[in-house]
Image: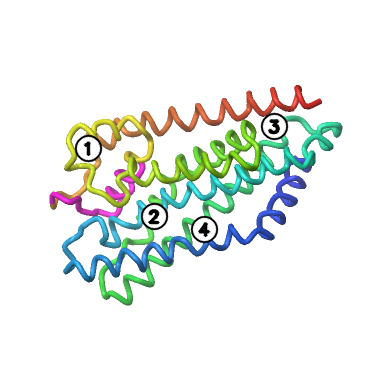
Amino acid sequence: MNKILNFSKRNLKEILRDPIIYIFCLGFPLVMFILFQIINKYTGGNTPMFEIDSLLPAIIMFSFTFVMLTLALMVSKDRQTFFLKRLYSSPMKSYHFILGYFFVGLIIGISQTIICIVSGFVISLISNVSFISFAEIILLIITQLPMLITNVFLGILIGTLFNDKTAPGICSAFISLVGILGGCWMPVEAMGKFELFCRFLPFYPSVYIGRVITSAQNSLGITYAFDRIAILGLIPIALFMIANIILSFILFKKNMISDK
């Protein structure tokens, strides 16, 4: 356990030295909240998905993709600078490295979630609108953890497979897709077969479940409920999370053996 903790401390120090963590992972939620609140105001408040109760789960889920980007850059750079190769001669096992990256990603993601919630609360006070209860906040954090774990391991996986020049491009494309397929900023519930397609991926179900907790309304004026869509949505969320975890451990170990 000491090996994992020591490696995690090193990773955390490296990440905190990188400006990207402050620009995207910490500053991003506040900027997004302000931007969409301005848009909602100038559309006469007629955009339900830009209301705080609908926007909060979307921004939390979407912001996790920047945790993925951060870890992908870190792992790929560690590989390219031969930092990991030098450590491979130490008694550390592959799972020590993976968990060392994972715990740091988890800390960043949870911190990011708290910043999103605090930002939403402050804006609700300024806008004089109601905000979710403390119990709902805890439940929202818990239900979004699987997507955080998925993104953390996906970042490790991308960093393992690609170098530090290719990884950012792949992550950028993925971030754009998540915004669309997650229904974060567009009313996919009114798009028929496209919504059906989004249900088979983990992003839209994660946002959907979050909006159930915040009692948000969709673009059709219907309040989100823990219905069949939410229940079945747990399946792709679990499958994608498990797949990313397994692939990360397998491919990282395979690369570790080949690099030795």
The residue lying at 18 percent from left, 50 percent from top is 223
Q: What's the CA distance linking mark 1 and mark 4?
A: 33 Å
- Whether residue 235 appears in magenta in the rendering, the answer is no
Under mark 3, the amino acid is Tyr
Q: What's the CA distance linking mark 3 and mark 4?
A: 28 Å
Mark closest to the chain's N terminus, 3 or 1: 3
Q: Are marks 4 and 2 in contact (CB under 8 Å)?
A: no
Mark 3: few/some/many CA within 10 Å (<14, 14-19, 20+): some
Q: Are marks 3 and 1 in contact (CB under 8 Å)?
A: no
Under mark 2, the amino acid is Ile
- Label disc, if present, on residue 24 of the rendered structure: 4
Residue denoted by label 1:
227
Q: Nearer the viewer, mark 1 or mark 2?
A: 2
SS of the residue at dot 1?
Answer: loop
Position of residue 66 relative to residue 251, above or below, is: below
Mark 2: few/some/many CA within 10 Å (<14, 14-19, 20+): many
Left or right of 199, for residue 63: right
Q: What's the CA distance linking mark 4 and mark 2?
A: 12 Å
Q: How was the colour assigned to the protein in this rendering?
A: rainbow
SS of the residue at dot 2?
Answer: helix
- Label disc, if present, on residue 95 of the rendered structure: 3
Magenta span covers which residues? 206-220
- Residue 6: percent from left, percent from top: 77, 47
- Residue 233: percent from left, percent from top: 32, 34
Mark closest to the chain's N terminus, 4 or 2: 4
Residue denoted by label 2:
59
The residue lying at 82 percent from left, 37 percent from top is 87
The residue lying at 22 percent from left, 44 percent from top is 225
Under mark 4, the amino acid is Phe
